[in-house]
Image (tube, rainbow, N blue to C red):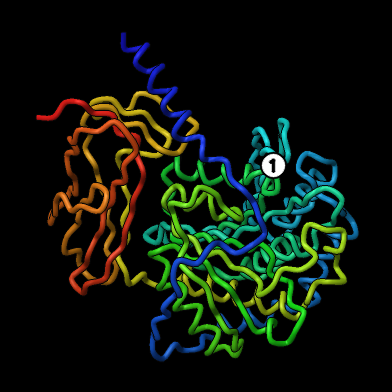
Amino acid sequence: MFKNLLKIFSFLVITLLVCGTVVTSKTMAQDNQQINYKDMGAFYTDEKIQGIIDKINETLVRNFMEDLVFEIGSRYTGSYGCQKAARYIHQQFENMGLQAKYQDWSAWGNRWNPGFFESQNVIGTHKGTDPDYDEIIIFNAHYDTIKETVGAIDDGSGTAGVLAAAYVLSQYSFKRTIEFVTFSGEEIGLRGSHAYARELYDKQTPVLVEFNADGIGGATSAENGRKIRLSVTEDAGWIASIMGNITKDYGFNFNITGGQINRDAKSGHSDYFEFIQLGYESVAIWQAEWANTHTPKDDISNVNFSYLVNMTRHIAATMATLADIDVEVPQIYIANPRHGEIFYNGNMLKNIKYKIPVVIDETNIYAEAKQGLYPIDRVEFYYGNKLLFTDKEKPYEYMLNKRSMGLHKIKVIVYDKKGNSATDEMRILFLNIKTK
């Protein structure tokens, strides 16, 4: 009987959750609102940060770009060029003294790239020095291309930026661990980043923020060469504020625009999408304009190297700042239920490939909250937009026992004594016909 019930639930899951297929259009995520950059006051210039900025120069960035474009060329996922690029990036990470590793993955492509693919992500880890600062910082780009293009801007620019930042930041020590990641499979449906983000989540690795650089070398005018567009998650505004202060205090003079990422979107435009679906905070960094991408003209002649260098400097300076500072704001995540699992009567039964969890009967919602500079005041539990319960003491939990046969959103919000807040939310397939 129960096995037959599971089959029915599995069918419901496939029907309701198949929307996980993504579209990888090279446009910025839709902005829901303008980012409000808080002026963080006197943001002192630091010799360490200035040294990092000075070491990232055009020669360094151009050498990585020329290796990718001239020595390797097209890097369509599964091709020889893609394999060669993975080996090249791995060797570069090893030469920098990073912990270099491959992450093998296999998956079916998307509707525009049907077929079964096997490929590799390449990860370079720069270990932090303080175990109390356990949240990692991620800087990623995708090294694959579409067919018949060398992908200098999309996304050779992001990959060269990751390599250049890794080369310089590896020469310094930081309290937090930094992971430099290059994905394959982006152009066939974000397949590589899906494997990486899901492994992070399954291992319960704490992540402070993920920076996604997909096209950071395209600017055809002086005006656009002074622009950065950002897409940020709801709790990453304080990081955007730091980026705003860095652009002023270190002389970049970028005009930063952008908006908030919609976690409810059914499709994504780049590898950040896989992170936001699992609740991670993300800052997606975009160039001011898109031209020649996904065409044979996406070659090195159309890369604005001074712009690419400054974009890489800015990202590296932000990461270096975050890697050493105390986080002022609180953090929170839903520890139970978990993405990609089936729960029955509060117990986890099995893992599923979809991200949305299936909850059968009642379940306990657990929230793990971490304070910033100020003590935690309370944690609120929501079902949809309705506040159900406020908990002021650990463990932060609420027994969900509503009648339901469909998709619903659960949300938790933590507040500290200063009024700072953070949010985590997830959609669940909630199947419960009995209530107490």
Identify the element where label 1 is drawn.
Answer: strand
Eyeballing the image, is 137 above or below 191? Answer: below
**Extreme left residue here?**
436
- Looking at the picture, tell me which residue is in the foreground, 93 or 380: 380
Q: Quadrant of the N terminus?
A: top left
Residue at x 19%, y 38% (from the top left corner)? 400
User: Residue 9's spot in the image, x, y percent?
Assistant: 38, 23
The answer to which of 205 and 338 lies nearer the viewer is 338
Task: Please give left or right for residue 62 compared with residue 394 in the image.
Answer: right
Residue at 28 percent across and 27 percent down: it is 360
- The quarter of the picture where residue 202 lies is top left
* Mark 1 neighbour class, 10 Å CA radius: few under 14, some 14 to 19, many 20 or more: many
Task: Give residue 305's quadrant in the image.
Answer: bottom right
> Residue 318 or 49: which is nearer the viewer?
318
The residue that appears at 41% across and 57% down in the rendered structure is 134
**Residue situated furthest right in the rendering:** 70
Residue identified by numbered label 1: 120
Give x and y (percent) for residue 330: 30, 64
| Residue 175 seen anywhere in this rendered image of the structure | no
Residue farthest along the top direction in this orientation: 1
Q: Position of residue 147 (x, y in %)?
A: 83, 48
* 187 is higher (above) or lower (below) than 215: above
Q: Does the image show residue 201? A: yes
**As drawn, is 160 to the left or to the right of 15?**
right
Report the quarter where the C terminus lies.
top left
Q: Amino acid at mark 1?
A: Gln
Report x, y in % for residue 111: 68, 38
- Residue 407 falls left or right of residue 317: left
